[in-house]
Image: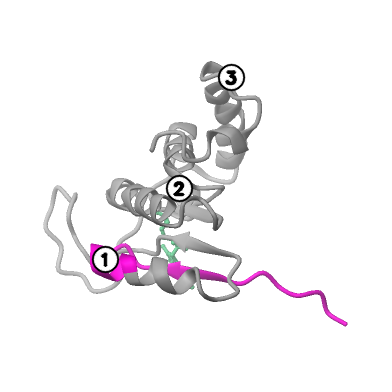
Amino acid sequence: MMPPRPLFVKIAPDLGRRELDDVIEVVQGVPLDGIIATNSTLGRRGLSTGSTEAGGLSGRPLRQPSTEIVRYLYAGTRGRLPIVGVGGIFSAEDAYEKICAGASLVQLYTGLIYAGPTLPHHINTGLIRLLRRDGFAHVSEAVGCAL
Ligand SMILES: Cc1cc2nc3c(=O)[nH]c(=O)nc-3n(C[C@H](O)[C@H](O)[C@H](O)COP(=O)(O)O)c2cc1C
């Protein structure tokens, strides 16, 4: 028999507080393994040039909004459900920001396009430095520390 596969729900960064509250309520009542926050955005805030291009915007302009959503979900679920933080991660500092906001894992996409396949290595070594600086022995100790 196949082992059960973990089930995650991935949410958009364009949800308002009420919609996020609905997500928090629903995810706690179903057998879910975690939340991935966030997908790319339909918004165009944070761009120095206006854009009317269709499609989802990823990368740096998404970093802060997605971190705020991670923080909100972590507080709302009281840390009981793993959160995968994603959106605008280009450095160890960016990954650490997501972890401190409540992410147990991080994911990146756009950063790889700009920085290439060595980026995860740089992020991992940078994370070790940041964890040591703040007195954490393991990344799990830092999850949600900035709440
Ligand atoms: C070209 C491209 C394709 C993507 N395709 C998917 C997809 O098929 N499914 C999905 O859940 N997210 C998809 N995403 C969203 C990314 O997984 C990620 O959530 C988002 O880009 C924010 O992270 P980033 O700023 O590190 O790119 C895609 C993003 C990009 C840029």
Would you name the residue on which mark 2 appears? 111
Q: Quadrant of the N terminus?
A: bottom right
> Quick check: 34 above or below 22?
above
Horizontal side, residue 33 vs residue 101: left or right:
right
State the colouring used for the structure image. one colour
Q: Position of residue 72 (x, y in %)?
A: 35, 52
Horizontal side, residue 42 vs residue 122: left or right:
left
Q: CA distance from mark 1 to mark 3?
A: 34 Å
The answer to whether any part of residue 90 appears in the image is: yes
Look at the numbered disc 3 and say if its residue's Cβ is closer than 8 Å to ligand 1: no
Looking at the rendered structure, the kind of residue marked 2 is Gly
Rendered residue at 39%/56% (across/down):
76
Rendered residue at 45%/47% (across/down):
111
Would you name the residue on which mark 1 appears? 14
Work out whether mark 1 precedes mark 3 in sequence or the reverse, and give the earlier one.
Answer: 1
Would you name the residue on which mark 3 appears? 132
Looking at the rendered structure, the kind of residue marked 1 is Asp
Furthest-left residue in this view? 50
Work out whether mark 2 precedes mark 1 in sequence or the reverse, and give the earlier one.
Answer: 1
The secondary structure type at the circle numbered 2 is helix
State the extent of the magenta-drawn residues as a range.
Answer: 1-21
Image depth: mark 2 or mark 3 in front: 3
Whether the residues at callouts 1 and 3 have beta carbons within 8 Å, the answer is: no
